[in-house]
Image: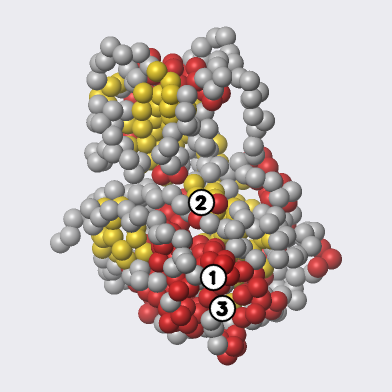
Amino acid sequence: MGKHRAPGTESAAHPWLRKATAGLSIFIMTLTALGGGAVYAINGLGANIGSIDTSDLNNADRPDSFAQSDTSPTNLLIMGSDSREGDGNDIYGKVGGARSDTTLLVHLYNDRKDALVVSIPRDSMVEIAGCTKPDGTQTRPYETKFNAAFAFGGPVCTIKTVEKLTNVRIDYFVVVDFKAFKTVVDAIGGVEVCLTTPAYDPVIPGKGGSGLDLPAGYSTISGEQALAFVRARETLGDGSDLSRIKRQQDFIASMIRGMTEKGLLTNPQMIYRVLGAITSSIKTNPEFANIQALQDFALSMGGLSPSRITFVTLPFELRGDGNVYWTAETDALWQAIRMDQAWPLVEPSASPSMSPVASVTTVAPKPSDISLSVLNATSTVGLAKTAASDLRTKGYEIIKVGNSTKRLTTSEILYKSDQLEAAQVLAAQTGITKLTLDNSLVSPIVLLVATDWKAGKVTATTASPTPSASKSTTPSPTTTLTPTPAPSGSPTANANEGTAADTTCTEGNNRVKK
């Protein structure tokens, strides 16, 4: 198994170069790799950028936008197209039309030092907008899956649908195809990914397959394997699009870290190679389709770093028909973006005079009142799922199940300050003696399951649970979670999936090669 690379030291380059590096990271995050590299680009590259007619967007009917400046809140919509048109895309079969199974809404907060990246599931059942089709005919609004908007009317129809559903103004957009994605990955020397089990998915003529062939552990993969990694669905994880969304978020986060650590903008040859491929492969709105505009936009994000780029999948619930439905919490997310507010919404903090471990309740909560996430902190496959099942039988509500990058021999409970008594109840029932306060958690409580876990509890100990008053110095473990589909009709808790600074391992398929 490979090792994590240590974060690179700060470049000794000029301040404007460091700002450009940050700008480039955000575009790589959104599968474009444009931005600060434009500082070095030959002006002729600007002619390569494809511009899409947006006249079908009636400004009178669109949501209000923040007055755009180099520090204003801004919304960028990223759409990954599976079109087989264009050089290098026809090798993936003869499939007519184009679909966008990957749609990301990137919200840049005021001052552009923080960003929120929202993944919109393709199987969301929504009312798409009425749009103009390529042949000039009009479609009427009707309920169907979200990704039908792109198939019917291209990126403009997707934008109209997003704005109609969210009342969020899309200021800019980018459409990225297969070739652009692969070329960027190759140009930066590959991207590191991590799998908990091997992934083997050979291409079988007439039946499909992505061609993915990776071992368990860490691998640095090239463009072709990277495309297979982010596109694969049925053969990895639980086979759902929701699992694929999490894997894509993990990959993009790793790409951002790699771009930052490698100091991309200190290598002009690499920059030109990336820009040449990207500008000839992407399509965008007319206002964005020139090098100068992209350069200015990228340089406005000088304070943006991987740790300040947050990934979320919009809140949803799964119903009996297998489709994704938006909830009241989804509406709250769009409201937060419209108001340029942090997400998840920040609750008022406790009084400064209150002890970090002070109890705010007088009656200990019951297991049925306690919600937590469970992470596997060992190399034993499936231990978190086993522990989650053990706890469900005791009445606990399990929010998510996933894998931690930590490897522990002693199980540990991480908790937020208002969850001390709940953490103590969990500790008493499981025999865990290590409790750590961590207010950076997304889940109220996180159980790190170690090798001492057996039959619903840990190895017996005579020590009493001792809460730590200091915040854990390790990264928040909630960033390693994989969304687990909820039972039919129940809400799925999936607010915050982590930041671009976090390293995660995803589940392979453990197939046997023949």
Please give the residue where the numbered disc 2 appears in the rendered image: 307
CA separation, marks 1 and 3? 16 Å
Which amino acid type is marked by label 1? His
When asked about the image quadrant of residue 185, the answer is bottom left
* Residue at the disc numbered 1: 14
Report, in whole angstroms, how far the alpha carbon at label 1 lies from the one at label 2: 22 Å
User: How many other residues sit within 10 Å of disc 2, few (<14), some (14-19) or many (≥20)?
Assistant: some
Q: Considering the numbered disc 3 on the image, is that residue within a helix, a strand or a loop?
A: helix
How many numbered marks have been drawn onto this rendered protein structure?
3
418 is higher (above) or lower (below) than 13: above
Nearest the viewer among 133 and 64 is 64
Q: Where is residue 115 shown, x and y percent of the image? A: 60, 55
- Badge 3 is on which residue? 38
Q: Is residue 260 left or right of residue 142?
A: left
From what the image shows, is residue 55 above or below residue 23? below
**N-term mark: 1 or 2:** 1
Residue 461 percent coordinates (x, y)? 26, 15
Name the N-terminal-most of marks 1 and 3: 1
Answer few, some or many: residues within 10 Å of disc 1's Cα (few below 14, many 20 plus, some between 14 and 19). Answer: few
